Image (cartoon, rainbow, N blue to C red):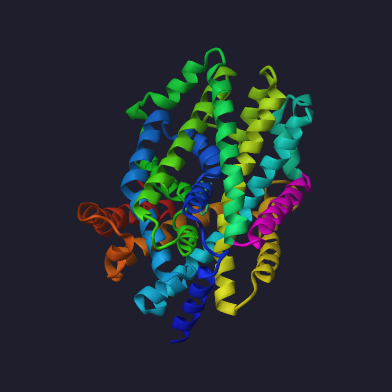
Amino acid sequence: MKDQRQSESLQEKTQSAGERFSSSGFILAAIGSAVGLGNMWKFPYITGQYGGAAFFLLFVICLLLVGLPVLLAELTVGRGGRGNASTSLIRLSGHKLWGGFGFITILGAFVILSFYAVVAGWTLHYAMLSFSGELFKHNDFGLLFSDFNNSWMPVFWQFIVLLLTGFIIMRGVSAGIEKFNKILIPGLVILLIVLCIRALSLEGAGEGAAFFLKPDFSKLSAESALVALGHAFFSLSLGMGAMMTYGAYVDKRQSLGLATLAIGAGDLIYAFLAGLIIFPTTFVFGLEASQGPSLVFVALPAAFSAMPLGSFFGGLFFVLLAFAALTSTVSLLEVPIAFVREAFGWRRSFSVIFLTLLCFLIGLPSALSLGNKVPWLTFGGKPFFDWMDFVCSNIVLPLGGLVVTLFVGYAWRGAAEEAGLSSWWLRLWLFMLRYVAPILVLLVFLYSSGIIRF
Ligand code: PHE
C-alpha cells in the first residue's frame, strides 16, 4: 500500500511539467546516455584486442539480438511503473523482491558513475592540454599519462565532471537533462564528422580502416563473443537502471519500439565512426591498437602530435570524448536521484548535492589508485579502479540485465500492452527475452565473473 502511494507520488511528479521528456528530447537523451566512453574509449581497445572487424561484427549481432530487446524491456518497465528502477519493478509485480533486485542496479549505476567520472575527467584534462599545445611538448605519452595519474590532477578533474553533471541534473528533466542533450548531441555529431574526414584523409588510412572493416574470423574466440555481448550491454546503458529511469519520464504516446531502434542505430553509428577515426589514426602513425585502456590517452596523442594542426584536432577529439561522457554521467546520476527523491521525499536540489558529493568521495580511491600516491589501493593484482570496473561491468551489469529480462519475459503480464508492438514484433521480442537473452546473459555472467572459463 505504502509502495503504491510512493510510486503514485512519483507518478504525479513525473507528470508535472518539467519532469517529462518531449518526444525528440527523450530520444536524444537516451542516445546521449548510450553514446559515451564505452564507444570511444572502451570499444576501440577491445576491438583491437579481440579481433578487429570480426569482433565488430559480433558486437553488432549481440546488439541486435540481445541488446535491443533488453533495451525495449527497460524502457517499457520504466514507463509502465513510472518509478525509479526499484519501485517500478515492485509496482508492476506487486512483490518487494523484484524491488530488491532493482535496487542493486541503482547501486551499480552509482558505483559506475564514481569511476566513469574519473575517466571523463581525464578527457577534460587532455582537451585542455591539447588546445594549449602543452600536450605536444612531450614525446613520451606513456610517461605523461602515468605522471598525470601520479598527481592530484585526476581528483580535480573528477570533481569538475561531477560538478558539471550535478549542475545539469539540478535543473530537472526537461530544463536540465533534455536541454543539455539537445545542445550537446548536435555538437557531438559535427565533431565526429570533422574528425572522421580528418582521419580518413590521412595518407595510408586504408590499412587501419581495413583492420576495422575486413573480418578475419580466425582471430575470434569464445572470449570475444562474451566480451562483445557484455559490451553491447554497457554501450546501450543496460543493466544499470538508466534506461528504466529515463523510461519513467516518457510520454504514453511515444512509440517505444521506434525509440529502441533509434537509440540502437545512434549507438552503433557512433561506435562505427569512432572506429573510423581511431584505427586509421593509430595505424598511420605505426601505433598499436591493442594496447588496452591507455590507447586513447597514449597512442592518440602521439598520433595527433605527428599530424599537421594536431593540437587543434587533438583538442577537438578530447572535447568530443568529454561531451559524450557527460551525456552519460547525467543519465547515471539520475538513477540514484530518482530513487532518493522517491524513497526519502528529498527535493531534487538536495538529492543532487548529497549524491554528487557522496559519489566524489566514493570515486576518490578510483581516481588515486592508478598512481603511486596510495600504494595500498592496489590489491589482488589490480588497482582499485580496475576492481570497480570489473565488479560493475562484469557482475552487476549482466545481473541487472538478467533481472529485467526475466521480469518482462516471465513475471509481468502487462508488458505486451505497455510496449505497444504489433503482433509479429511482439512475439519476436518475447521470444528473445524468454529464451535467447537469459541464456546468453547468464553465459556472460558466469564467464566474466570467472565462474566458467573456456
Ligand atoms: N553507455 C555508456 C557508454 O557507452 C555507459 C553507461 C552504462 C551509461 C550504463 C549509463 C548506464 O559509455
Camera-side residue: 174 or 395?
174
Residue 156 among those drawn in magenta: yes
Which image quadrant for residue 351?
bottom right
Q: Is residue 271 left or right of residue 303?
A: left
Can see residue 382?
no
Can see residue 87?
yes
| Residue at 43% over, 87% down | 1
From the viewer's perspective, is residue 367 above or below residue 148? Answer: below
| Residue at 56% over, 50% down | 328
From the viewer's perspective, is residue 23 above or below residue 134? Answer: below
Q: Position of residue 293 (x, y in %)?
A: 57, 39
| Residue extending furthest toward the top | 203
Camera-side residue: 125 or 421?
421
Residue 298 among those drawn in magenta: no
Question: Magenta residues: mostly which secondary structure?
Answer: helix
Chain part drawn in magenta:
151-172
From the viewer's perspective, is residue 127 above or below residue 84? Answer: above
- Quadrant including the C terminus: top left
Q: Is residue 341 left or right of residue 444?
A: right
Camera-side residue: 10 or 128?
10
Which image quadrant for residue 388?
bottom right
| Residue at 33% over, 50% down | 66
Which image quadrant for residue 198?
top right
From the viewer's perspective, is residue 77 above or below residue 141? Answer: below
Q: Position of residue 367 (x, y in %)?
A: 69, 51
